[in-house]
């Protein structure tokens, strides 16, 4: 048994692990910052390229590419080896950034965003594979805490970076700078990543599942473009049904996208993936609809509304670092506490967002962030510990892909709830007040289902992924 004394930050970075840790964190930064920076620069893109009608496509295309790449990252790393695959992910991301930076029309810009999503999804997926193969299990909670810290930094610096570049120069410079960073990452990855995870051929790429997955994710991603509430609801329901079909197909396919037991909620993998999907989906409304609601009902500036919503990332980061050294029964307890905090946060936000004292809004956002800070690392560690050697690559990369898919589904569900109460007709006091309740109430069943799965995941008699 690994000793508690060895579970320290110093030991984490010892024995040659520092270079691997550094390149993984650079990959996390690229994935996080690039996914967050676009909202700041899109107005400038629209003025330059005439693409105001396609704003949502810039985000949707990125996340469709990221989810598909993340889902295939495990198999790709088996075929090409972790170092070469990770370097390839950096090259793809750099290419997407160059396409967007050099775009002469909105079509090429959007195509570049899809390619950036592919590169970003592969980078984040390969990072999970690297964590699973290159770090001892005792250090996983600290590695995930560091990942959370980088995401927290990116949440603040990503949009700020984009804003500063646009004010002092050209929006295209943002993508040129990310292209340079991606090239640096691509060169560094094969030099600094080592150890296990080398090419071993593998059974191949599960193309049928990826094809069906693209349909499901695409339907969810474009739900808010349907033009009517009925159309949006139909697309979300169809997308969720197609995602369920992917899981069903995968359990019967000769080449699997997910590890054995992923479709069985009685297993660690099944309950862990479902908990990650449902909890992430339930959390999306605050980040998307919090700023416009605060601006409309409380008169906040965009900057101050952004700072209020950023309390979620701050709480996530602080709580994750605070519990990173938990061992024994405490990882189980923190996971369950975090899952219950998610449900509590939605209740608080639904009550407080419109009229209650700002302190209660900050409390709700903090509970939301802490819910994941306390649970995500330990949930991921349990999933990784349950994976067989055969499934370690695809099972670890699937953690990110499942969460990204949950994020896309949650954004769509929150959007449908907001539009059903009038948000799509324009931002007024009435529509903002209604949305401030229903955006959160609509996803409470998902949060409860995710908490239930988290409790199953942490049962003492849970099956080890089989």
Image: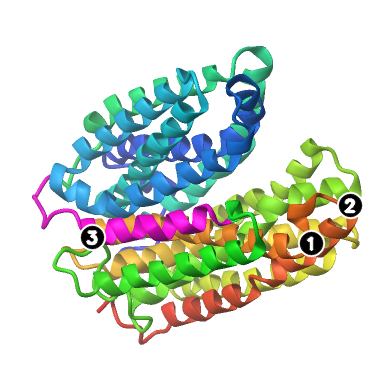
User: Residue 192's image quarter?
Assistant: top left
Which quarter of the image is occupied by the N terminus? Answer: bottom left
Q: Is residue 5 visible?
A: no
Measured along the vertical axis of the image, is residue 86 above or below residue 340?
above
Q: Label for residue 208?
A: 3
Magenta span contains residue 222: yes
Residue 177 location (% of width, % of height): 48, 20
How many other residues sit within 10 Å of disc 2, few (<14), some (14-19) or many (≥20)?
some
User: Residue 165's image quarter?
Assistant: top right
Q: Which residue is mark 2?
A: 297
Residue 419 location (% of width, % of height): 71, 60
Q: Which residues are magenta?
A: 199-223
Q: Secondary structure at mark 3?
A: helix
Measured along the vertical axis of the image, is residue 20 above or below residue 6?
above
Q: Secondary structure at mark 1?
A: helix
Q: Is residue 314 left or right of residue 22?
A: right
Spatial separation of the CA atoms under disc 1 and disc 2: 10 Å
How many other residues sit within 10 Å of disc 3, few (<14), some (14-19) or many (≥20)?
some
């Amino acid at each position: 048994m690994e000793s508690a004394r060895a579970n320290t930050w110093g030991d984490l970075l010892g024995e040659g692990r520092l270079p691997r840790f550094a390149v993984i964190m650079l990959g996390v930064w690229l994935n996080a910052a690039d996914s967050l920076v676009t909202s700041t620069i899109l107005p400038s893109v629209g003025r330059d390229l005439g693409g105001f009608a396609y704003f949502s496509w810039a985000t949707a295309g990125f996340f469709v590419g990221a989810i598909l790449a993340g889902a295939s990252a495990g198999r790709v790393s088996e075929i090409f080896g972790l170092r070469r695959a990770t370097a390839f992910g950096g090259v793809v991301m750099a290419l997407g950034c160059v396409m967007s930076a050099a775009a002469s029309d909105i079509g090429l810009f959007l195509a570049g965003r899809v390619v950036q999503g592919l590169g970003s999804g592969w980078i984040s997926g390969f990072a999970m594979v690297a964590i699973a193969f290159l770090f001892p299990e005792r250090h996983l909670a600290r590695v995930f805490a560091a990942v959370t810290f980088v995401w927290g930094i990116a949440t603040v610096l990503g949009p700020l970076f984009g804003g500063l570049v646009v004010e002092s120069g050209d929006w295209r410079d943002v993508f040129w700078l990310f292209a340079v960073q991606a090239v640096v990452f691509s060169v560094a990855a094969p030099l600094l990543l080592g150890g296990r995870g080398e090419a071993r051929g593998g059974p191949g790429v599960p193309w049928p599942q990826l094809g069906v997955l693209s349909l499901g994710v695409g339907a969810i991603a474009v739900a808010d473009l349907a033009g009517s509430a009925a159309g949006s609801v139909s697309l979300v329901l169809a997308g969720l049904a197609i995602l369920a079909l992917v899981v069903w197909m995968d359990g019967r396919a000769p080449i699997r996208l997910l590890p054995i037991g992923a479709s069985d909620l009685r297993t660690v993998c099944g309950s862990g993936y479902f908990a990650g999907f449902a909890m992430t989906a339930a959390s999306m409304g605050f980040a998307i609809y919090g700023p416009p609601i605060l601006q409309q009902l409380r008169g906040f500036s965009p900057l101050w509304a952004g700072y209020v919503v950023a309390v979620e990332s701050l709480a996530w980061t602080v709580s994750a670092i605070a519990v990173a050294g938990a061992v024994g029964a405490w990882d189980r307890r923190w996971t369950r506490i975090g899952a219950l905090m998610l449900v509590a946060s939605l209740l608080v936000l639904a009550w407080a967002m419109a009229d209650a004292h700002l302190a209660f809004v900050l409390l709700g956002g903090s509970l939301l962030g802490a819910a994941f800070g306390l649970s995500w690392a330990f949930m991921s560690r349990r999933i990784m510990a349950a994976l067989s050697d055969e499934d370690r690559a695809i099972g670890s990369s699937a953690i990110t892909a499942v969460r990204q898919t949950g994020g896309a589904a949650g954004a769509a569900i929150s959007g449908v709830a907001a539009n059903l109460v009038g948000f799509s007709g324009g931002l007024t006091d009435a529509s903002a007040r209604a949305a401030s309740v229903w955006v959160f109430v609509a996803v409470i069943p998902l949060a409860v289902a995710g908490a239930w799965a988290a409790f199953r995941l942490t049962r003492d008699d849970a099956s080890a992924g089989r």
